[in-house]
Image (cartoon, grey):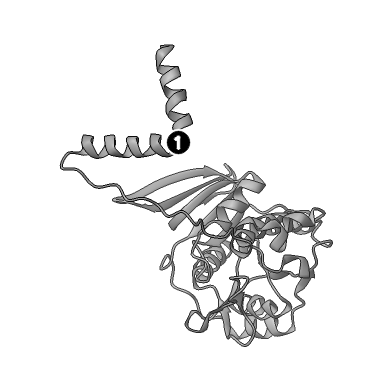
Amino acid sequence: MHIVVCIKQVPDSAQIRVHPVTNTIMRQGVPTIINPYDLFALETALRLRDELGGAVTVLTMGPPSAEDSLRKAMTYGADRAVLLTDRFFAGSDTLATSFALAQAIRKIGETWGAPDVVFAGKQTIDGDTAQVGPGIARRLELNQLTYIAKIAKVDLVARTIELERRAEGGTQVLSSALPCLVTMLEGSAEIRRGAFADALRAARAEVTVWSAADAGIADLLKCGLRGSPTVVKRVFAPAPRAEKAKPIEVKPKARETADALIDALFEAKPAMSAELEQLAAGL
């Protein structure tokens, strides 16, 4: 069984700083840690590996210093580590990040065998969007199983997985075909303490380092700031409108308030009023 775990090296949330111009996180001089949610994904992957055999590959995208987090993951027991690092990835939002990681996972599959399960944490503490995992699943055309609290059973013969998903008002029991992508919730497993032998192995192990070209990423316009519409929108946001919004007085009855809102809308957009009147006349 081959499992890929996506982790991220994040700034210590107590010392995060944001660039005043680009609105991107300033990482220089800020202590870093493995994203706490990703540790639960890693622990779950290692338990499956211990039970069913196979290998766990940890993957991260970041600066060269992110190798420290990969070695830390190996001290917990991960078998190999891949660092995706390139100046083209700087400033990536969730869209660009999911694109690059998906390409790297394809490359991992070509190199060490296609993964049966891709794990990720629910979200990161420096973003909180919870979009990267589902974004990877969409690009790789994998079933996405999010907010998972427990892996109940994996059947490698039938190629199925059973899970428990935390949902509003209760727990859902899901079954999916493999391969799939799973995002794990916090508290879903007790994080192990790495063995001394794994710590020695992690210190001596060779971390595989891939550039964009090494990972087979040809379309660099989808990477970094150029492939990050949410970041570009913040950096090059249009100037605020000079005309301010006009308040609508709330009437005693909802219908009267709705009528006042429609009157104000038609006053501001007379062409819309004429078009609707013409449409109504034709009915």
Where is the N terminus found, in terms of image quarters? bottom right
Residue placed most toward the observer, 223 or 241 = 241
Q: In this view, does 235 lie above or below 67?
A: above
Query: Percent position (x, y) of residue 185?
Result: 44, 62
Residue 14 can be seen in this image: yes
Q: Which residue lies furthest to the left in this view?
A: 252
Q: Residue at x 77, y 70 (%)?
A: 87
Q: Which residue is drawn at 58% across and 86% down?
A: 31
User: Left or right of 191: which side holds 170?
Assistant: left
Q: How many callouts does the rendering have?
A: 1
User: Left or right of 264: which side holds 43?
Assistant: right
* Secondary structure under the numbered disc 1 in the rendered image: loop
Give the class, few, some or many, for how many residues have Cα within 10 Å of label 1's Cα (few <14, many ≥20).
few
Query: Percent position (x, y) of residue 180?
Result: 58, 49
User: Left or right of 23: which side holds 59?
Assistant: right
Q: Residue at x 54, y 56 (%)?
A: 131
Q: Which residue is drawn at 45% across and 36% down?
A: 269
Judging by the rendered image, the residue that carries numbered circle 1 is: 269
- Three-letter residue code for mark 1: Lys
Query: Percent position (x, y) of residue 44?
Result: 51, 64
Residue placed most toward the observer, 129 or 148 = 129
Where is the C terminus found, in terms of image quarters? top left
Residue placed most toward the observer, 227 or 175 = 227
Q: Is residue 19 above or below residue 275?
A: below
Q: Which residue lies furthest to the bottom in this view?
A: 29
Query: Percent position (x, y) of residue 228?
Result: 66, 58
Asked which quadrant contains residue 25, the reply is bottom right
Residue 86 can be seen in this image: no
Q: In this view, does 129 lie above or below 35?
A: above
